[in-house]
Amino acid sequence: MIEVKLTDEEWAVFEGQSVHVDAHEVVSGIACAPGGRVDVQDWRSVDRQLRSLGQRRAVLDVEEARLLLIARRLDVHIPLGYGTFIEYVERVLGYRPRTAQDRLRVAERLEELPATRAALAAGEVSYSAVRELTRVATPDTEDAWLAAVRGRTMREIEQSLAGRAEGDHPDDPADPDLEPRRLSLELTPEAYALWLEARRRLEDELGERLDDSAVVTAMTRRVLEPAATSAAPGPATSRPPYQIAITLCPRCDRATQAAAGDVLDVHATTVEQACCDAVQLGRVDGAHVAAPTLTIPGRTRTAVLARDQHRCSVPGCRSTRGLELHHIQWRSRGGDHRTRNLTTTCSVHHASVHAGHLRITGEAPHALRFERAGDTPYATDVVAEVMAALRGLGFRAADITRAVEQASVHVGADAPLETWLRASLRACPRPASSE
């Protein structure tokens, strides 16, 4: 057995006593028939051994999750000569990079969900079930979710979690708009390399890690973005990114969008986002066809984009493609089309605003405030300079974001650039070039 010496704080990553099980204990715990073989004729014995292995595996999953968090915080890959922590996990534990990242995500969530962690350690739920539960369960709802999934198959669990968001209760109605559509692709090595490079560039441009939906949205929006023509000179961003055609369900007022021959449900937040900056075609299911109208007057839109230099105004974001105008005071809350109430955002950050993950307040262009959910300062002008400086030093985008957030706890918003830079450098683990 490998012994690891840890501080009290590191031992406290997970509550309760840790259970160490090595390979010898697992093997020796299996009762075998004379001669060292399991008696395959005794179905009760085989069933008992399989259940025992399942419970022991659950204990190991909990232990692995705890040690993964500690290992990452201690940067164990550095003295061992691995380029990144994911490479260390891939080579030492044999996980694919995506599986390793998912294991780390589950480990972080288990740290906040003691009941789920205990249920996994006791073998009451499988790791596969816990992997799905950690996407929606919170400390307030985990007991209800555990009761709801006990005794169910993985297929039943996946169906019960479909259309659920983090914080939802099992008794809450599912939102069909939240159920993701699975897209399976088989790519040649060359195409896969291009995909990875394009994803990396998007994340570097936006200054944060993107999930699959955000990556595909950004890529496809850039392909679908209309090119400038002689009839409509200027950048492609001078025209609204959306065309809104309202097809109203007479029974439920459900919003739908046509896509390649299919009609898909559209989430209410997506409709709000589109209504900020669109060409409204009006009703297309009536006898009279109305003339198209612009959500924002054309001259106003052109002026705001020019003022914001045709780039996203969120500090730290360098995106100049897929741009949309956002009403700082939402139109649904009385916001108007004056330029001081309009700011330029990329499609990813605009979606974050309407999803409630990012808040923009104040007046454009010089009195804007950006906050993450929970009133955490998102960035300021000086912070944008710090993030640009850290990028120039070779730090990873995800590390820069975390470092600036940690620095904001100790540094005031009015602190000079040098103070911000020093605090952020202390919080940054290392440049990407050293990984």
Image: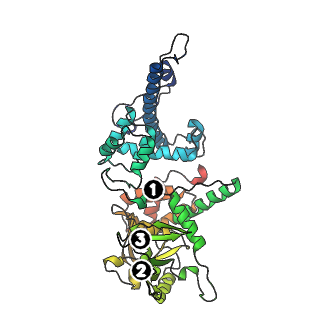
Task: Determine whether the residue tagged by mark 1 lies in a helix, strand or loop.
Answer: helix
- In the picture, measured across the screen, residue 306 lies left or right of residue 360, that is right
Q: Of marks 1 and 2, which one's residue comes earlier in the chain?
A: 2
Residue located 55% across and 47% down the image:
98
| Local crowd size for mark 1, using a 10 Å CA cut-off: few (<14), some (14–19), many (≥20) | some
Between disc 1 and disc 3, the foreground one is 3
- Is residue 8 visible in the rendered image? The answer is no
CB under 8 Å between discs 1 and 2:
no
Tag of residue 402: 1
Task: Determine whether the residue tagged by mark 2 lies in a helix, strand or loop.
Answer: strand
Label 1 and label 3: CA atoms lie apart by 37 Å
Give coordinates of residue 69: x percent, y percent: 45, 42
- In the picture, measured across the screen, residue 297 lies left or right of residue 36, that is left
User: Disc 2 marks which amino acid?
Assistant: Leu
Q: Of marks 3 and 2, which one's residue comes earlier in the chain?
A: 3
Question: Which residue is at the front of the view, 295 or 344?
Answer: 295
Q: Mark 3 points at which residue?
A: 255
Name above or below for residue 233 compared with residue 209: below
Q: Name the residue under label 2.
A: 342
Between disc 3 and disc 2, the foreground one is 3
